[in-house]
Amino acid sequence: MRAVSLSQEPAFSTLQSHFVCGVKDISKEQYAGVSRKHQQDGQAIRTTNGAGPHNLQVFMLSADGTVLHCLPGYWDPRDLVYEMGLAWQLNQVWTDPSLSRSQKDQLFRQMHLAHERQHPADMVFRSRMQSFDQKYEAKHRLLTSDTIRDPRLITASSASAGMLPQAAFKTTDEIVHERMALRPFLPFQEFDVASYVDYGRPLYDKHEDQRNLNGQRVAFDREGEKLIGNTDSMPSKRRARRGGLGRYAMQRGLQYFVRHGVASLR
Amino acid sequence: MRRQKLLTAALSMGTALACWLSPDVLAQRVIPGYVAQQRVARLTAQIQWHDRLPDALAEAQREGKLVFWVQMLGQIGGAT
């Protein structure tokens, strides 16, 4: 995010002009996820809004430490600035002496939900949950997850062995505003980060350093590569290996299907 | 037979298009390591990053700004 999003306009200028910035390493926090270790000169990759929620969180706070907004994971610089605008509006509400506390909390919820409804279509498109996170939610929390809009669509696609339908899931921009709207204005110390950022699997890895510049993966994992974060949250190696093989078989099947389909045109 | 081939081809093209249009695939644009390094250098050189929240809040109160507090695996200017 630091290379892809925060350093890019319009986010960079907005940060310089309107915010005081701070950073904390959460590698040892219980709610942290897991990532492969990337060096400073390692490759970076653009991803979708809200990707990697356990590994990265951005808080926008009033000067007294009240949480105005929290964005889990990566966010596109354009969308980040759009959400910064909401934080500024919420700060006006929070610091308005003419409003009672209950009025402020009510406005907090209303403004988060209203903002989500006004998101531009391209932002919504950039906010689709990563497919591996969708699979995780469908597998572990089909009937309880607030990230799933319609569990019946997932059940139906599973029965036909099809891909998970996008329509079954909420977008991440929708999820974050709905979750924020469940909370009143809270001091940072009282904000329940663990439950707020809890969607998708703990491991986020796009294999950035294993891709060529076209994005194709040209290298594969080696035993003993260093991971950072809360590795206790990872599934066991045996289960991970089984999942990896399944994924590999699916990819090869798709490649075979596409290749033979193209060949049949000849 | 020809109809079946056309159907297979159409399905295959549809699958390929769906994969190509998927946000995961669309979003996978790689930024070379030297560019990423330059961007990180700019971010850390031109913006002061507090490592204590009370310090950031005190500065925000003095300057009438909000606080942008990032929590991440690793360091903003180092390995992540």
Image (cartoon, rainbow, N blue to C red):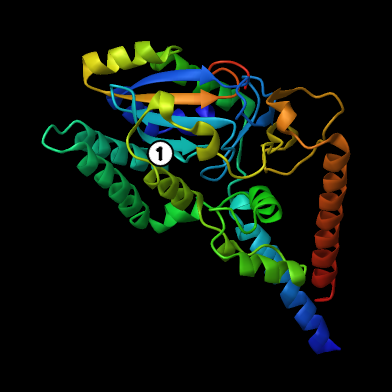
Indicate whether B77 appears above or below A75.
Answer: above
Looking at the image, which residue sits at the far left?
A: A98
| Residue name at image x 76 percent, y 22 percent | A226
In the rendered image, is residue A257 in sight? yes
Say what secondary structure mark 1 lies in. helix
Indicate whether A48 appears above or below A28.
Answer: below
Q: Residue B6 versus residue A144: which sits nearer the camera? A: A144
Chain designation of label 1: A
Pinpoint residue A2: horizontal percent, then vertical percent: 51, 27
* Quarter containing the C terminus of chain B: top right
Indicate whether A112 appears above or below B56.
Answer: below
Residue B30 in which image quadrant: top right
* Quarter containing the N terminus of chain B: bottom right
For badge 1, the amino acid type reads: Leu
Classify 10 Å Cα crowding around label 1: few (below 14), some (14-19), many (20 and above): some
In the rendered image, is residue A4 in sight? no
- Write down the residue under mark 1: A80
Pinpoint residue A149: horizontal percent, then vertical percent: 54, 62
| Residue name at image x 81 percent, y 35 percent | A219
Q: Residue A34 versus residue B5: which sits nearer the camera? A: A34
Pinpoint residue A243: horizontal percent, then vertical percent: 83, 47
Pinpoint residue B41: horizontal percent, then vertical percent: 50, 17
Quick check: A111 left or right of A135? left
| Residue name at image x 40 percent, y 46 percent | A182
Indicate whether B37 appears above or below A259.
Answer: above
